Image (cartoon, coloured by chain):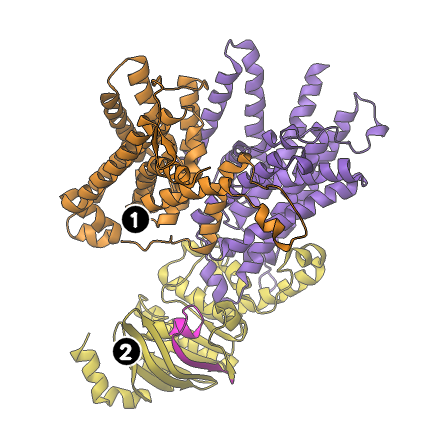
Amino acid sequence: MPIINFFIYLLTMVGIYGLLAMSLNFQVGFAGLINFGQVAFFCIGAYTSSLLATKVGIPLPFCFAGGMVISGLFGYLMSIPTRSLKSDYWAIATLATAEVIRLIALNEGWLTGGPFGVMTIPQPFQFLFSRDSYPLFYLVLVLICVLLIYFALSLLSDSPFGRDVKAIRDDEELCLSLGKNTRQIKLQAMVVAGMVGGLAGALFAHYITFISPENFRPIETFLMWAMIIVGGRGNHAGAILGAVIIQLFNVSTRFIGEYVSLSPDVMASLRMLIIGLLIILFISYRPEGLIKEKKKVYYLKRRDGE
Amino acid sequence: MEFSQIIVNSLIRGSELSLLAIGLTMVFDILKFSNFAHADYAVLGAFLAYTFNQVFGINLLIAIVLAALFTGLFGIAIDRILFKRLRVIGANPVSLMIISMGIEIALRNMLRLIWTSEIKTYAIAIRKPFEILGARITPLQIKIVLVGFLSMVAFHILLHKTKFGKSLRAISDNRVLASACAIDSEKMITWMWFLACAYGVIGGTMIAMEHVLYPRLGFDILIPVFCATILGGIGNPYGAMVGALILAFAENIVLALDLSWLINLGGFFNVHSIQISTGYKPAISFVMLIIILLWKPTGILRKK
Amino acid sequence: MLKIKDLQKNFGSLRALDRVSLEVEGDSIFGLIGPNGSGKTTLFNVVSGFYEKDGGEILFKGERVDGLTPDGIARKGLCRTFQIAKAPEKLTVLENMMLAAKEQRGENPFSALFTRRRTARVERENLDRAMELLEVLQLVDLKNEYAGDLSGGQKKLLSLGRVFMLQPDMILLDEPTAGVNPTLTMQLMKAIKELQQREHKSVFIIEHSMKVISSICDKVYVLNFGKKMAEGTPAEIQKNEKVLEAYLGGA
């Protein structure tokens, strides 16, 4: 039944982008790090995992892990200039870096297959399921990952580490005066975010079974930004909501194109035009997004035992 | 490639980029945020100029002037509707930057809707290029360099010999003090946007005439323009020009470099020729930008 | 406890600090006064590591601390507040206090995820201490309010609370009563004195109000044009001719 398959595909992509949105949100909404190169984590995770699987042939769990580790490492590298660069300079640098990564993937054919990308990427537990039921299994796999990451990130953001991260976002100078090693904390935040982004990339690669530099253009970063701006920064549920909304919009307008007599090119332009307008409108009139950041409230028993 | 050709190519590309970099550096300096949509304003104007000239047959100069007018008004409108509100309440410049990102996406796709993704070219008669000291340069390219140079001169005159220019410099140096001297910031900002867009349109049209015009052009030249701006130092229009030239030079020379001498140094290898693949041409400005941001984000030229 | 020798800080040709030397002892409250622009906050900024010095030495508990990062200096036990009280917008008052707590667990991702029980225990202990301090500062009712929503005076109190959570050996207070109404000023002074006597810290306080200085300081230094002009007890300073001239005749 094609409708069911479509929904399974849609939900799987929502899940993958949900991970990416949560990763970006952790950087932007929690740490205040304006990353315009988020797609780089996606790209590195996808390529690392798929190349490990196709060229080196190690078991798939290690490929996924490898994708996460290398992405996390890249997060570490990206965090190094944050001490010395103002936020908008760093943002531009991340944009440039992500594009350089993509160009390397495009040009170094001996490693990445160049414009032809990586093909016939193996899928985990493929042998256990029939061709028809496999997508459902993969959806469950993605959703489990989303849930795990959601809980892990929630634990992190509620912990003293999360408190430090938010404090750095709001006032880094204060944190320094309180003895916090802000560079290290930002580094850790970027590594965590990188790993989550890398996981998303690996899940994507092994789902689609074929990736190329075309999948990792800057437009992807902007889509993720739209997700966290619309859904709400500073909280993980907002990131997922944003992913749902934007992906639904994205995918459904592809569908409508079949019924309305507009060319795919026009549909694509309209789609992105609306995304741009959404970003503008939300930042201008509802900067917190749809789901606001929650206040951390301490409930304490009164001292006299009331 | 002859070294003189590299110089000539750098002059041409540098002239094109500098026209955009001037506008960007002004906005960056006076409004304190990086306008991601700047290059797209320029491309909007380039599309308008193209339509006026190539479709409606209007004289090129008039077409450019009209396009600059429209785009200038457009830039002012965007500022009034979107940026001014947040500026007045003292919002974080990062929010402005994110809005400009939204504008970039929306504007680029609006261009795609109106003019389609089809590549546009100017119908320019093919003439035999001149040869100067071993380098080839076409009449169009000579005009481009000339326009770039004259525009810089005009800007210099504007900045130093007019009241507007004095006010602009005052605001750039110290906004609070300037308003205390009864300089109407908002009016100046309006004119600044107009100027930035107008210059951008000229630059964008030059690029369109020398190469091709397509909706993604804005995004493609965004990073090179940013690189030139930051190289030259924010707020320094002369620096923007120098930065553009340096960047153009770097782009051209890196590709012409043959790195095999490096590899052959130890005498262990005998590689014939190693060059950086042309697929990396866009990456040169990106890498330069990253290097400059890490090494000297205030730019290599001091602010005037 | 804090020894400053010939400290120099220039801004271009301006000598903000001109070979300043002074000493602050432990378990006491010292004051730093001077006309506007005399270099008081600059001194704090250099000592706490936020500005780089151009010359001289800073010794804290016998160790050289000039050249360390601001957070490194804070970790050594030398902490400061800011002239314009800092209040992170999206952190509550209690979160602010907990943020400043000296001993914390779970401040990195690994321990946050895998040592949750120990982290929770330390958090509870810090919570108790934070509540105690909030009671002294009379901020308890605001404990779950965003710091950004507090009034100016309340933010100053919060700064004080934060810096005491750090359990530092020495505190640099930069104009803790600036912009604060007289009643609150009394409250602040009382709190500082009480806390200092309880915890036996060393406090170095920049102030404009002679009333405040004379009510709590054991000794006072006077800065003028980046140079140390005078030193002594509050009573001595108030009679010092040069000081009077600087305040009345100068700025």
Question: Does the segment drawn in magenta span residue A16?
Answer: no
Q: Chain of mark 1?
A: B
Colour purple maps to chain: A
Front residue of B42 and B122: B122
The residue positioned 25% from the left and 40% from the top of the image is B152
Chain letter, orange: B
Q: Which residue is mark 2?
A: C34
Which of label 1 and label 2 is nearer to you? 1
Name the kind of residue labelled 1 in the image: Asn
Left or right: residue A189 compared with residue C39:
right
Q: Are marks 1 and 2 in contact (CB under 8 Å)?
A: no
Q: Amino acid at mark 2?
A: Gly
Residue B82 location (% of width, % of height): 34, 35
Residue lying at 59% horizontally and 59% vertically, measured from the top left: A300
Chain part drawn in magenta: C44-62
Name the quadrant containing residue C177. Answer: bottom left
The answer for which chain carries disc 2 is C
- The tint chain C carries is yellow
Q: Position of residue A96 (x, y in %)?
A: 50, 42
Classify mark 1: helix, strand or loop: loop
Quarter the C terminus of chain A occupies: bottom right
Q: Are the residues under badges 1 and 2 in a single subunit?
A: no
Where residue B52 appears, x then y in whole percent?
Answer: 29, 17
Q: Secondary structure at mark 2?
A: loop
Q: Is residue B265 visible?
A: yes
